[in-house]
Image: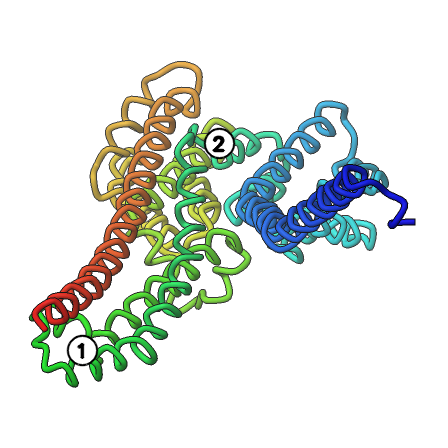
Amino acid sequence: MISNMSGDEYGTASTVAHYSMGIVETVIMFFCFGVIVLLPALVFSGLMHFILSLPMQRRDRARFFLDLLETAIDRGQPIEQAILSAAESRDRVMGVRFYMMAAHLEDGARLGEALEKVPTFLPPQVNAMLRAGEKLGDLKKVLPACREVLRVAPDTARTTTHYMVAILLIFAPIACWLITLLSVFVIPKFKDVFAGMNIQLLPLTVFVFNLDHFNLLIGFEMLVFFTLLAVAAIYIGGPGLVRWFQFRRVPIVDWIAWRIPWKQKKLLRAFSAMLAVLLDGGVPEAEAVRLAGDATANEICRRRAQRVIAALGSGVKLDDAVRAFDDTGEFHWRLTNATHAHGGFLNALRGWHEALDAKAFQQEETATHIATSGLVILNGLVVALIAISMFGMLVMMLRSMVAL
């Protein structure tokens, strides 16, 4: 059949066959690229988005739960019955812990008991506030304070910070692996070649490619990686993870939280909001201070609240007694003004609570950007030192070859 074809027909058939093979090879190449590169990248991006969104999902669930409680109270419906009715929907948005709590309610437990048995369902402060409200017999009084705790300042830069941390988490182990390969396989070979050619290395190259210094670089990258990994685990795991490192007699986690400026402002806001709600509800001052201290879910705040209660017991006014809680004295000034304001303590202190939120947000974002930017710069310096030393070696070798 081929012998009966003319030369032009045979050439055309060969061109078509070659073109078809080219299309097949291109399709296979794009398919392999998608499977090997794009698919893992998309899976990794989706996984990172899911992991980094877990804290916001927990906050949204807590807000939905507070809305559920408020709706049930406004309708005059029993809280436990409202929660069990919501659990019958089997909506996955609420998470498995919501249904665990609903199971305890179905077994006859009260709301406070169910929350205590599932402590990771709500943030610790909201959990403590709701249990305090149940003890008072009026949950609706503490709902505004709970929302004060869950309120978040606008954080447009947080998404960028998340991706910076994610990039550093990827870069640090890769950098450790590359530096190890250089120190084991590449640098010794270069040193042997230079020794055979009697080439004197530059001082910077000798300093950087010293084995001990390379080990320091590897140790630095490992320290960066594990530090970021710990920070990411704490952020993603939330209070449920942190509570495993908490000890009642030695509250190291609570002490660290109180010493962090933005954490301290958030704790002060939680204490102030709960205290204002309780005072507006007519709770005695000493009992209000005790419950407000418990609502912070922080042992340091509880101890400071006990100092306030002791000062109240000795006849000191509340606005003066709170000096034992806040070292700056601003709480004393704000509470003194609130006692003379109309509309209740919570409305009078709302502006201060918003200011505390804004300051905490600013300090947290500043610290995060300084830390991430500093780590990026330090990693860049490490890469620059290695690159300059490597090119310096190559330049010295080329000069020696030209001289010969």
- Mark 1 residue type: Asn
Q: Is residue 66 above or below residue 344?
A: below
Residue at 30% x, 33% y is 359
Work out whether 180 lies above or below 160: below
Residue in the image at 41% along x and 63% along y: 174
Tell me: residue 168, above or below residue 8: below
What x and y, as percent, mark residue 355?
33, 27
**Amino acid at pointer 2:** Arg
Front residue (pair 224, 393): 393
**Tag 2 secondary structure:** loop
Q: Identify the image quadrant of residue 160.
A: top left
Query: Could you tell whether 9 is left or right of 178 in the image?
Result: right
Number of numbered callouts drawn: 2
Q: Residue at 66% across / 46% down in the picture?
A: 26
- Would residue 326 be visible to someone looking at this image? yes
| Picture residue at 22% right of the left edge, 84% below the top | 192
Question: Which residue bears the numbered disc 2?
Answer: 151
Q: Which mark is residue 210?
A: 1
Q: Earlier in the sequence, mark 1 or mark 2?
A: 2
Q: Which of the image's four quarters has the C terminus? A: bottom left
Q: Residue furthest top?
A: 342
Residue 303 in picture, x, y percent from top left: 35, 55
The answer to which quarter of the image holds residue 92 is: top right
Q: Position of residue 249 (x, y in %)?
A: 40, 69
- Residue 336's tag is none
Looking at the picture, does residue 399 appear above or below residue 17? below
Q: Label 2: few (<14), some or many (≥20) within 10 Å?
A: few
Q: Nearer the viewer, residue 344 or 79?
A: 79
Q: Report if residue 121 is visible in the image.
A: no
Where residue 58 appears, x then y in whole percent? 59, 44
Residue 395 sits in which quadrant? bottom left
Nearest the viewer among 402 and 307 is 402
